[in-house]
Image: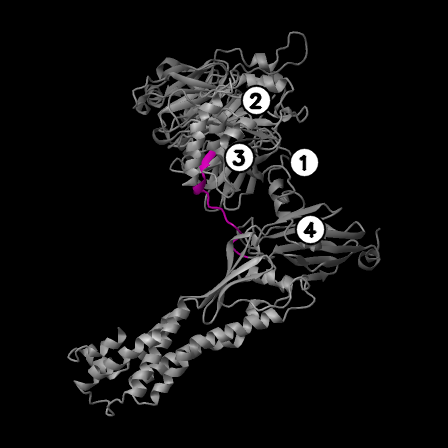
Amino acid sequence: MASQRPEARPTSRLGALGARITLPFAAAAVLLAVSILFPYWELRLNAPQYPRGLFMTVFIDHIQGDIREIDGLNHYIGMAPLGNAAHLERTVAMGAIVAMIGALGVAAVLRGRWTALLAVPAMLLPPVFLADLFYWLRHFGRNLDPDAALSNAIPPFTPRILGHGAIAQFSTDAMVQTGFWLALAASLLIALGLVQRLHQPVPEPVDVPSRAAVPGSVSSRPRTDHPAEAT
Amino acid sequence: MMRRLMVLALIALLPIVGCSRQDVDTSGQPREDAAEEAQEGDDDAGRPGSVGVTGESVEEIAAARNLSPADVSAALKTYMPSGRHDEYLMFASGGHSGQIMVVGLPSMRLLKVIAVFTPESWQGWGTGGTSTEERLAGGDARPGMPVRSADTHHPALSETGGDYDGEWLFIGDKSNGRIGVIDLRDFETKQIVKNPIADGNHGGTFVTPDTEWVIEGGQYATPLGGEYAGLDTYQETFRGHITFWKFDRDAGRIDVARSFSMELPPYWQDLCDAGKKVSEGWVFCNSINTEMAAGNDGTEGGVNFESGVSQNDMDYLHLFNLDRAAEVAAAGENTTTVNGMTVIPLEVAISEKLLYFTPEPKSPHGVDVTPGGEFLVVAGKLDPHVSIYSWEKIQAAIAAGPTETDTFGVPLLAYDDVIEAQVELGLGPLHTQYDDKGYGYTSLFLDSAVARWTLGGAYRTDGEEPWQLVTKTPVQYNIGHLATAEGDTVSPDGGYLVALNKWAVDRFHNVGPLLPQNLQLLDISAPGTTMPVLYDMPIGNGEPHYSQIIKSDKLKGWETYPEIGWDAVTQAVSANATQSGQERVERDGNQVTVYMTAVRSHFTPERVELQAGDEVTWHITNIETAYDATHGFSLPVYGINLSLEPGETESFAFTAGEKGVFAWYCTEFCSALHLEMAGYMLVDPQGVAQATGGDR
């Protein structure tokens, strides 16, 4: 797959470029950039009177869907409006993503061993995203207004972040979405790139690419590692 | 798969079940013995095992409920499982309810009643809301004389190229000469116009093929413009009219300034239809009372209208050149103005060749243009025929130049020159619609039947004899109008026909001397003599006159208003829209303005404290965005009752003249805490002294 790319003949310009940059990092940067166009996570609420379901769709920097309606329902149990959640995260998200993409670009081009570490923040994005989501869901579910109309009926709870749950007459289905999968794929590519970079010394003079040694040897090792990482 | 097996099993059972019944009838004839059974007082309720449905197999259920195979077949054709939507929607006038009913076909489920000319508190129509009161007042007949009753007759769906487009709906009020305009995005009346020259109509509404004009034919001749004249001057001073209302589709309103009327002889113009395709640009109306009977003054030898109007063997079918009339009206050189309405005088209509007559048999009712516009079908009412006029022959006769005129000088085309055929159908033919198989369907009032007959000309491609009666299906009882699916458009669908019967008599359990009307669904999908009745729908809130049936996928109504704070009159965000967090009560002297929101399950604010004498303007915005999350608002004593659909802003205004404490609440069961959705308005009588110096 991606690891086979360096074998491309360096006679083509693209091949020459491929030999000079760390392709998994570059590909990860692209995936990450695309991921912001797609939702990362979605919650579907099901109840008899909502035959089409209610949706809360989380992108990297905003929430959309039936937020007004969900907020309206949540106020009965004293939950704060969803717009109050993760203010900081949503504010900095786009800047952070751009920075991660930039860092990935640098890491891809400057092939020093330590510049590879610039790719680490982007690699950690998926777990950080889930952890933050979990924190906010838990925070909202556990900090209900005791004066709310139905505060007696619903004890504090933590909504399910993945899979099926139930709250009052609602059943919930939560799952990560396309954006998250793209970011996760970027993480795996970054891991792959890191393995390349940290375990396989790269010729120091960047402007004197070796025509034979690099591509062949680079490709062999990650191919053995890759299946293990993927599973 | 299971369903298919069930249906097969059901069909297989039909003959078996049928053996137990003598009144099996697949041709749609009424089961007279069933009616007799009911009259014996030994109805189903008394039969052992008939309470509830016993048994599980179709055979057991059919036996337990005493259903014939035809009954089971009709049930299968009309039953809608929960959640399944109807294929067609029927818009039926509500008659003297002043409303319009929306009914699904084939289930015949009532989906909605649209308030038009009469107050209706569920929709908050004319029950205090400023915008609804203003729209209703737009139809008031005279200054200071509000009219809040009506008799809606003929709904007309807007058309594009002669086909329903599902955007607008019009309806005429016979009793006061008014037209209502309904926006089918929110199924709400947007405009009511009152005819300035006449206080009644019958030939309305009908639209031209692109809805440029909404046609309102008159009925009872009077002096135009509300003038007085004695009945002894009937022929000289009384006049009929036809009014062409200009519809501005972009504005969604009738443009009164560009509308016009035509003065007509004092016959009683009756029903109209717009020409289509080859006859587009023309309009046709029939008439009665060419006798010019003026009523019985109660002296000996006086003649009642019912007799006086029915003396002539022929009345006059009116033929209007609308395209040319519109040019004459727009030019304005030969027109007059009555109460602000442009009127083409009768002599101008004659001299400009805008109007022709041709004889039509005996007090007819209904002139219905065939889908291609080639024929005009006039139903005899007091003549057992439908008379079919050829548009081609009419054009030829006009071109040849008619030599005769009526009493008023209107050119008269000779009957023999323009008639194509007559079909004898039965007694009391009234109205005709069409299907996709080249049949006409005519209601027979006296026979209480629907007649199917063959059209001729290009419609006859199946080898059947043209202009022949094919079959009749009895209906219960006294059918007026009928409607087939898209049956008055350029491309009728066929399939279903609804008979709008005036009398129900024994069809339903007696509910007192005032009985419902009976709308019956007929299956007209099979050619030939099979045309069974499938379903009886009682109408318990008025007498539907006419209906139109539109394919339901043409209707694209809003689920909620597009934005929070929607003004349903302008169809844009209101200047008084109040968002969450903007709620407030503003006071300027004794002028109080309330900006309120409604959302499950509270109003904000929940207290409004007033002083007696305050002039109050109160705006409420339903800030919901959920499908079906409507709130109501009912304020006692002051008579305010609003319906606030999701996103809508509505207002009302009043003077706080009555002291006390008034608990308002949400009248829609909007949520589990619906009862808690309430508030208090306090009117402090001491306020009089402070605010106005005390006049109370």
Q: Secondary structure at mark 2?
A: loop
The residues bearing labels 1 and 3 have C-alpha atoms spaced at a distance of: 61 Å
Q: Is residue B111 above or below residue B33?
A: below
Whichever of labels 1 and 3 marks the residue nearer the N terminus, that label is 3
Q: Amino acid at mark 3?
A: Glu
Whichever of labels 4 and 2 marks the residue nearer the N terminus, that label is 2
The residues bearing labels 3 and 2 have C-alpha atoms spaced at a distance of: 68 Å
Magenta residues (range): B548-563
Q: Are marks 4 and 2 in contact (CB under 8 Å)?
A: no
Q: Which mark is residue B56?
A: 3
Q: Quadrant of residue B625?
A: bottom right
**Which residue is more in the foreground, A111 or B365?**
A111
Is B556 within the magenta?
yes
Q: Secondary structure at mark 4?
A: strand
Q: Amino acid at mark 4?
A: Ala
Q: Chain of mark 4?
A: B
Q: Which residue is mark 4?
A: B653
